[in-house]
Amino acid sequence: MRYPSATSPASERLDRCIFYLDEIHTRGTDFKFPVGFKAAVTLGINLTKDRFVQACMRMRKLGSGHSLTFWSSNEVHQQIETLKNKTLHINHKRRKGDGRNTLIDILRWVYDNTEKATWGGLHYWATQSLSFQRKVSAFQSIDWNNNQQQFSDKLMKDSAMGCLEPQVIELKLMYEAAKTLQTLLEIHDLRYQHTSYQVCNDIRGAVLNRLKVYGGTKQRLSQLLDGEQQRELEQELEEERQIELSPPFNPCKPILHEEIKRLCDMDDVAMNLKQYPHIFRHLPYALTGTTFFSDCQADSWQKNLWVLTEFQRVISTQGKSLNPFLRPLRWILIYRNQELILLSPFEANWVMGRLSELHRKGKLMNPVSTTLCLLLPRMKRNQFIFINTPTLTVPPLVGLPRHTVEFVTSNDCLVQLFIFNGTLYFESIDEQTAYCQCLILCPKPRSEQEEKLLNKAGLEQMNLSANIYIVSI
């Protein structure tokens, strides 16, 4: 199962995690790595300065608790060695420890790749300036100040043809002329002179000046440039997802039973929910029709946790698994401060209105013993989940008589509701302990007795605090 990084339990324990970030995900990620974290940076072919720095700066505290190591293939290692030996030959001296590549050697190799990439991209950049000016020239052929001008099909077609680049280059044009070596400045200066459309002098001057500064004296065959139609494209991750949607089903029409209405009647005696099995069932009944029902150990749940049969009814189609249609747990009716009843949104809407009406009319007994409360799964640390908050119930439990003991949902009930609604975090150690005991887990730190039992194979019994727990190895 996948969780978002922000809500994953691993976000609070980054020191126990191993991260793999490919080239694409080195952008836009900002993990709060703890002090002492070390990263392994892989050096790929033709790695440039921008990509190199982007990857290394994921370690936000370099030199202040974060460190890096570099790993490369044999081919990259040979390139670094070749450039290193060339540099030593030019300087006519050797440094101490030249047998091993240092950070200076890696940075020099990255800088050399950046120079090559910059020089290789100058031609495409200058060519794009010509393409842009061709489109501007075609756009300016239309008299935009003439309000009477008709945009005929011929005019629009001529404008579109003026923007097009040649899709096919004849071999005769490419190879007939003599092959000559020229610098990028000379090549594109001649191209500007032989253009058949109007050229912006400002753009022309800026492009040629940039080619003069960065193009250098390196030469290449001018005829072969016309045949190079490649463009430098950033690598993109192609991910094809096929989401299988559930087929359409017929939803169940909600029903409001008379027994639900009786729950809000404070003048009547308390209902014995066991006498209405067609309406009230214990909590595991909500899992009926799902694959988890056979493994949920129905007899192990709290006996005061109830669910209405209407809560389980979602679709009317027979013979289909209800895994995708398991209703989330949100509304709980606390009945006479004894029973906790899970309601569907349809039932909760009616009960909320009825209790609010009785509260406004003053027809509820004081203190109130039947309330409606909301329960949210705790997906983030310190998240508020509403339950056990007297002021947020319906009706609100405010202005109670002195010495009134408010009803508080016990941890034993809460943890079973947490299992049902997918809670990820706990508010206290007591909640965590109760949760582990409910699932028969033995959390750390463990006592000496627990460690001895866990070191044994098979099933062992632990007698802790007058309770017996079964631990499976």
Image (tube, rainbow, N blue to C red):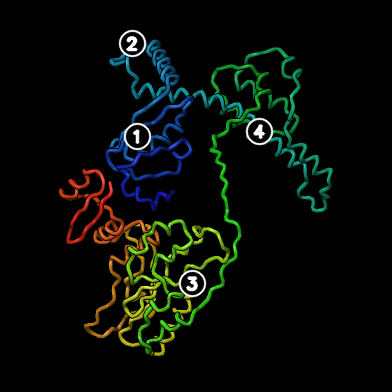
Residue bearing the label numbered 4: 201
Q: Residue at x 39, y 71 (%)?
A: 306
Left or right? Give the position of 107 relative to 207.
left
Q: What is the C-alpha distance between the residues marked 2 and 3?
A: 86 Å
Tell me: 267 left or right of 442.
Answer: right
Question: Tag 4: residue type?
Answer: Asn
Task: Residue 310: give its label.
Answer: 3
Assign a secondary structure to mark 4. Answer: helix
SS at circle 1: strand
Q: Nearer the viewer, residue 293 or 136?
A: 293
How would you rate the neighbour count of disc 1 (Cα within 10 Å): few for under 14, some for 14-19, many for 20 or more?
Answer: some
Q: Could you classify mark 2 by the number of other residues whose Cα lies within 10 Å: few (under 14), some (14-19), or many (20 or more)?
A: few
Lower sequence index among marks 2 and 4: 2
Q: Residue 93's mark?
A: 2
**What's the amino acid at mark 1?**
Ala
Which residue does the numbered mark 1 point to in the structure image?
39
- What residue is shown at x 44% (from left), y 18% (from top)? 79
- The residue depicted at 79 percent of the width and 50 percent of the height is 146
Q: N-terminal of the two: label 3 or label 4?
A: 4
Q: Earlier in the sequence, mark 4 or mark 1?
A: 1
Between disc 1 and disc 3, the foreground one is 3
**Could you tell me which secondary element the residue under label 3 belongs to?**
helix
Query: Residue 460 placed where, x, y %?
Result: 22, 50
Residues at marks 4 and 1, CA–CA distance in whole angstroms: 50 Å
